Amino acid sequence: MRTRADIEKLENEILAPYAMRAGDSWGRQYQEPEHPSRTCFQRDRDRVVHSEAFRKLEYKTQVFVIFEGDYYRTRLTHTIEVAQLARTIGRNLCLNEDLIEAVALAHDLGHSPFGHAGEKVLDERLKAVGLDGFNHNQRSFEIVSQFEKRYPGFDGLNLTVEVLVGVLKHETLYDRKGEMKIVEDVDFRNKLRRRACSLEAQVVDKSDSLAYLNHDVDDGLTSGCITAEDLNESDLWRRAMERVRRPGVGIGSDMFKYQVVKELIDVQVRDLLNATNARIEKHGFASFEAVEHCEEKRIVDFSDVMRREREHLQGILNEKLYQHWRVERMTSKAKRILTELFNVYIENPKQLPYDVFNRTIKYSDKQLHRIVCNYIAAMTDRAALDEYKRLFEPYKKV
């Protein structure tokens, strides 16, 4: 049986010199004894998987709200796809797959119900009273460092610095980097600020981008909100389509869709690996510290040609899918539900559970808004819909 020390020794033998090793971690905010058979990053991954916030991802929107059907991606299936892509890419680059998986599984824990529509409602409500707004990266950090209460000695999951930095500095099309505002331990906060994104965290960023672009194509075609003809404007789509066009795979069939999406993923992953490997060889990284001090901050990235092709395909989705009347209707409905929930809680916060709203404390308006925001952000789509029905039906129909 392998011990933790055996695994760390194996990492030294098989990982690239620029990979992050568990034995080199900057540790945790609260010191804990090392586990005899798991590395620190393996423990982080397991803590995320067993968290309440991770389980709730099953009932949170990606693009299509859960009442639209069972086929479409949820935050959980999206997260699994990101982790799968990221591990594949990380293995090819000889990076630390355990660190990659821990960051990938934690990166979306902070999403509110109803996806980015819900996030926009919470963001606007907080900013209206002079607060900083809602940022799901910061929220993910707050969940793993404060809101999850599973251990007697501290709040949160007490994850390693490297995983926390990967969550806070996660950045894709929809993301804003976290601000690290809730850590009161000055020394630990400074550790977070000084630690740059590892190549492993950069792999998760690009895998997230890969996953949502391609599964949105898949879900969009399945829903009928976009068609193959809409996507023909994209060079990337046409190239993938030509590679799978063969007898038995007719345009418009499910098999055609599956094969084209598969090809889309494959061609982008190959480009990412080739372009990233070229940058690594150019810089000649001899250690993970060399990566952190490199002036070129995005080593894991696509080629210039692929970036342009991806941006064009993303633009088509922005126009044809995300602004489709059915998606707009879902988005408006979601915003209306969360707005009315927010209003009813602000008007009478005694409707909130006792462990959420302490009746003996006189809260300021800003504090009350933050309490309501945190309560709603923790809901799943289904929980928000059920709460809406309890508070408003039979007087209103959703």
Image (tube, grey):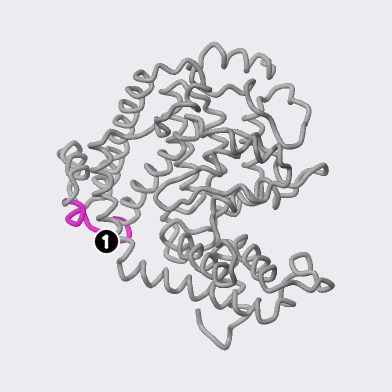
What's drawn in magenta, residue-wise?
221-232
Q: Which residue is mark 1?
A: 319
Q: Residue at x 27, y 54 (%)?
A: 315
The x and y percentages for residue 52 are: 66, 51
Residue 251 location (% of width, % of height): 18, 49
Q: Residue at x 52, y 49 (%)?
A: 76
Which residue is painted at 78% across and 27% down in the image? 33
Within 10 Å of disc 1 (Cα), the crowding (few <14, some 14-19, many 20+) is few
Q: Quadrant of residue 164?
A: top right
Disc 1 element: helix
Task: Pick whichever, 293 or 120, lies toward us.
Answer: 293
Q: Quadrant for residue 272, please give it.
A: top left
Residue lying at the far top of the rendered structure: 13
> The N terminus is located in which quarter?
top right
Q: Is residue 64 left or right of residue 374?
A: left
Q: Position of residue 270 (x, y in %)?
A: 30, 29
The x and y percentages for residue 32 are 77, 31
> With 212 as the anchor, is 99 left or right in this view?
right
Q: Amino acid at mark 1?
A: Glu
Q: Is residue 118 above or below residue 342?
A: above
Q: Residue furthest right?
A: 360
- Where is 357 relative to 273, above or below? below
> Does 230 appear in magenta?
yes
* In the foreground, 125 or 155: 125
Which residue corresponds to the image point at 30% horizontal and 58% vertical from the top-left? 318
Q: Hey, which residue is sitting farthest bottom in the picture? A: 395
Q: Nearer the viewer, residue 221 or 62?
A: 62
